[in-house]
Image (tube, grey):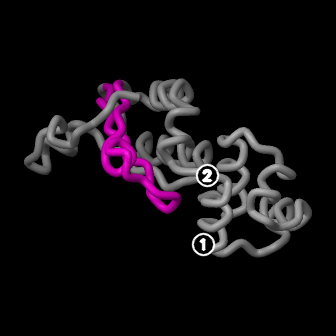
Amino acid sequence: MATNGAKLRARRTTMGLTQSAASKLARISQSNWSAHESDTRPLTDPMLARLSSSIGFRPSIAATVHRDRIREICAAHGACEPRLFGSVAKGKDTVESDLDILVAASPGMTMFDIVALEEELEALFGVPVDVVTEGAVRRGGSSWSNLDAVAV
């Protein structure tokens, strides 16, 4: 699991900002921003949310910026047809939202593959990621089409 400093760095780079530009938006010194990213200065969850909000970060932005990487990472773990659902797909996400991804599992895809996929995507985005397979949705008695999923 990524540290809050690593999450902050991922969010800043997703937004295409330097530490200097991000720290100006957050109204803190660049050295403090750097210390948070390198985990030499403690970064609480509420402070992570505040700093992320100050630079305009939301998971939907990360999903747009990293669209091609999402597909590549999913394919590398045996998942195809990635789709977003939940608050990101509905345009109602906030800085504290997670990223919900629905995938079609390749034959032989295991829970270990799903966990590895979630961890790699979390490292890329700096936000919690939940990966759900179509099969899991069907076993739950629903249809994935009811999730209002949007193709990545």
**Residue that carries the numbered disc 2 in the rendered image:** 56
Image side of residue 12 versus residue 101, left or right: right
The quarter of the rendered structure image containing the C terminus is: top left
**In which image quadrant can residue 44 be found?**
bottom right
Return the residue nearer the eye: 24 or 145: 24
Residue for point 50% across, 48% down: 59
Task: Decide: is 47 above or below 60.
Answer: below
Name the spot of residue 68 as percent of width and height, x first. Answer: 53, 24
Q: Is residue 96 magenta?
A: yes
Q: The disc labelled 2 sits on which kind of residue?
A: Gly
Secondary structure of the residue carrying numbered label 1: helix
Distance in Å between CA atoms under marks 1 and 2? 17 Å
- Which portion, as a residue range, is magenta? 81-106
Viewer-nearest of discs 1 and 2: 2
Q: Which residue is mark 1?
A: 45
Q: Amino acid at mark 1?
A: Asp
Which corner quadrant holds the N terminus?
bottom right
Q: Nearer the viewer, residue 1 or 93?
A: 93
Residue drawn at point x = 83 percent, y = 51 percent: 19
Q: How far from the left and from the top, in percent, is residue 36?
A: 79, 65
| Residue 112 forms part of the magenta stretch | no
Q: How many marks?
A: 2
126 vs 119, nearest the viewer: 126
- For residue 41, what is the image quadrant? bottom right
Residue sitting at x 34%, y 41%: 89
Secondary structure category for the residue under label 2: loop
| Outermost residue to the right | 31
Q: Nearer the viewer, residue 130 or 86?
A: 86
Residue 39 in picture, x, y percent from top left: 79, 66
